[in-house]
Image (spheres, rainbow, N blue to C red):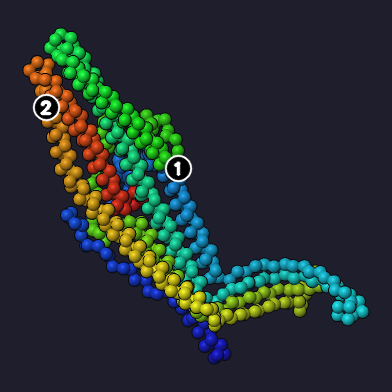
Amino acid sequence: MRFLLVATTALVLLAGCSLIPDDDRPTLPTAETWPQAPSTPAAEAAADLGWRVFFQDSVTQDLIAAALANNRDLRVAALNAESAEAQYRTQHASLFPTLDATAGFERSRTPADVYGSSAPQNVRQYSLGLSAVSWELDFFGRIRSQAQQAHETYLQQEDLRRSAQISLVASVASSYDAWLADSEAQAIARDTEKLQAQTLKLTQNKAAHGSGTALDVAQAETNLRSAQASVAQYNRQISADMDALVLLLGAPLEESLAGRMTAQAQQRGLPAVPDVPAGLPADLLEHRPDIRAAEHALRAANANIGTARAAFYPQIVLTANGGTASSGLHGLFGAGQGAWLFQPSLSLPIFDAGRNEANLDLAKIEKRIEIATYEKAIQSAFHDVADALSARETYTQQLAAQQALVAAEVRYCELADMRFRAGSDSFLNVLVSQNALLGARLSLVSLRLAAQQNAVTLYKALGGGWREGPGGA
């Protein structure tokens, strides 16, 4: 009894043994604050700011909702997470014995001369019972290491799904903004085309009455054809923007939603988005799903080392069954018909030509690779946020300067036109002023789009976009 108690205690202690190395997360390979931008802890992190709160425009919200429901890339990412979760459940089930209910019937005939008997032997056997097939006692944590690796892989795939959702939300919003900006640029080009047509008619009238020249007419026609080419260019760009947006949505655009988009485009402008708090660089470790995915990949590689180490130790496998057996159904449950089998086996590696050593070395190398990948993910995230923060400050200044430039070009164009109509100046100044105004207005549209997309990029870089609203996924 004393020996049995000691053996049982030893088995219990061995069953809790793990050969997985300690999980030490690498230190943050970045600065503690954002360069050229204040970093203070935020009351609400951008990752917790739902995309319906950040994108307050109803059309943008409906486009994002449609993409989340139909986008195929996101659907594949979700299925990959479900597949990894199923694989984890399969691996975790290996920790427990498999019990099967068995029922069998066997009938055989052996010729008499096989056993030297006077008559052939006819055997009929019925059996009923339970069996546990090849249950490994996980003394050294091999199966638990495999289960932990599968669990970390599942968590990695789940975070990759969230990262894919964040990218999709940002892509849909940016694509819609691009379509709005190109629609506004197209409207500016059309306005310019009308203005150039009027100017051409004016110069033709002046030339007919002797107060203008053929050169003025040719220059006016050149401006008109250039404006018509711009209209065609933006028509093509708008079509390409819509195709890209529909691809992201994963389904044809609903007619009602397309009508709302057109109505919003006619208002000429982009929907406003709020500024998001930057927080601290260390916050990215918890808020960026791609960083968390890299961390889970690192932990999975760490668990794989435990599996490789356990391969050096013995494996104990139990096979057992029990039940009743009889040559006839009437005696299957009779007294003395019990049958059982208990078959433990032990396997100890002695010579494998260095295979286990190589597998362990490979597992350690893979962990170092995952460490470098994890650190690279952190550095990339830091770079994304720092760039977006720096750009946010400069875009504000540049937009103010560009708006002042457009106002100045409008005044210049009006004065040049007035002087030309009065006959006190040449048409060349009108031509120059109109081209300069068109370029300034189109640059302002492009600049507004760049600033808007930078705000979306910052929201994405801070880990925002996978929650539908505050506190809910």
Q: Residue at x 10, y 23 (%)?
A: 415
Instruction: Look at the numbered disc 2 and give the secondary structure of its residue.
Output: helix
Q: Which residue position is annotated with label 2?
A: 412
Residue nearer the viewer, 404 or 321: 404
Q: Position of residue 373 (x, y in %)?
A: 35, 62
The single residue placed furthest to the left in the displayed view is 424
The answer to whether residue 186 is seen in the rendering is yes
- Quick check: 240 above or below 38? above
Please state, as top left, top right, bottom left or bottom right, where the N terminus lies in the image.
Answer: bottom right
Q: Name the side, left or right, on which 470 lies relative to 205.
A: right
Instruction: Look at the numbered disc 1 and give the secondary structure of its residue.
Output: helix
The answer to whether residue 418 is seen in the rendering is no
The amino acid beneath tag 2 is: Tyr
Q: Residue at x 42, y 40 (%)?
A: 247
Question: Within 10 angstroms of label 1, few (less than 14), some, or many (20 or more) residues?
Answer: some
The amino acid beneath tag 1 is: Asn
- Quick check: 225 above or below 440? above
Q: Which residue position is annotated with label 1?
A: 70
